[in-house]
Image: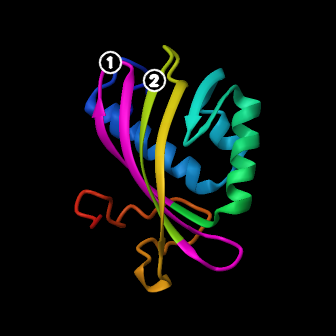
């Protein structure tokens, strides 16, 4: 990690740390923990849903993780600027019938001066996969182990 405050303007080190912190929080599947990374009035677009504010974020995450069971996520820095970060990600989950999916996505993040995210725009596609095609097997909920590969060389 970094000893530098995780606020803009971002260096590569800060951007990588922000991405990993976000990944770890989302892998906790704790809507309250995740929501604290966003400003009170944060604007979100997630797939076709558009909403604003921490209460809406918490409600969205509760719905998400009630549907997306055994969720495991890997995020990776794609690009960064002064107060913006772009990431790509993949996550796996199954529905209540046992069908596994891999979600592929990209996010654009914009941060306030205090380091909280004030805007998140996510484009995501789900693809059904066979159980034997899964890639993410660490204990969940919980963070991805440090020695687990990222996405740089992951097949599409």
Query: Which quadrant: the C terminus?
Result: bottom left
Q: What element carries label 2?
A: strand
User: Which numbered disc, 2 or 1, marks the residue closer to the eye?
Assistant: 2
Q: Is residue 2 visible?
A: no
Q: Do labels 2 and 1 touch, CB within 8 Å?
A: no
Residue range of the region highlighted in magenta in the rendering: 73-100
Residue lying furthest left in this view? 153
Seen in the picture, residue 117 relative to 147 is either above or below; the reply is: above
* Residue 147: image location, x then y, percent: 34, 66
The relative height of residue 66 versus residue 119 in the rendered view (above or below) is below
Q: In this view, does 54 lie above or below 148?
A: above
What colour scheme does the image use?
rainbow
The quadrant where residue 141 appears? bottom right
Q: Where is residue 6 in the image (x, y as percent from the top left)?
A: 43, 27
Name the residue rendered at 69%, 47% in the picture.
61
Indicate left or right for 38 with 136 as reference: right
Splitting the image into 4 quarters, where does residue 136 fall?
Answer: bottom left
Relative height, residue 84 to residue 27 (above, below): above
Point out which mark residue 110 bears.
2
The residue beneath circle 1 is 82
Q: Which residue is drawn at 69% across and 50% down?
A: 30
Q: Where is residue 106 in the image (x, y as percent from the top left)?
A: 40, 43
Q: How far apart are marks 2 and 1 (CA)?
A: 9 Å
Instruction: Estimate the x, y position of residue 131 in percent, counting from the top left.
Output: 50, 83
The chief SS type of the magenta part is: strand
Q: Earlier in the sequence, mark 2 or mark 1?
A: 1
Query: As rendered, which of 67 and 55 lies closer to the eye?
Result: 67
Towards the viewer: 143 or 68:
68
The quarter of the picture where the N terminus appears is top left
- Magenta stretch contains residue 122: no
């Amino acid at each position: 990690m970094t000893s530098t405050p995780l606020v803009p303007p971002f260096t590569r080190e800060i951007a990588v740390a922000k991405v990993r912190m976000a990944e770890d929080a989302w892998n906790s599947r704790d809507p309250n923990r995740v929501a604290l990374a966003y400003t009170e009035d944060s604007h979100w677009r997630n797939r076709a849903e558009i909403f604003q504010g921490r209460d809406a974020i918490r409600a969205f995450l509760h719905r998400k993780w009630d549907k997306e069971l055994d969720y495991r996520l890997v995020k990776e820095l794609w690009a960064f600027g002064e107060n913006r970060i772009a990431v790509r990600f993949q996550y796996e989950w199954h529905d209540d019938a046992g069908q596994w999916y891999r979600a592929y996505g990209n996010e654009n993040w914009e941060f306030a001066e205090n380091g909280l995210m004030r805007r998140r725009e996510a484009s995501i596609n789900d693809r059904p996969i066979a159980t034997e095609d899964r890639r993410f097997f660490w204990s969940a909920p919980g963070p991805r182990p440090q020695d687990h590969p990222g996405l740089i060389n992951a097949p599409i």
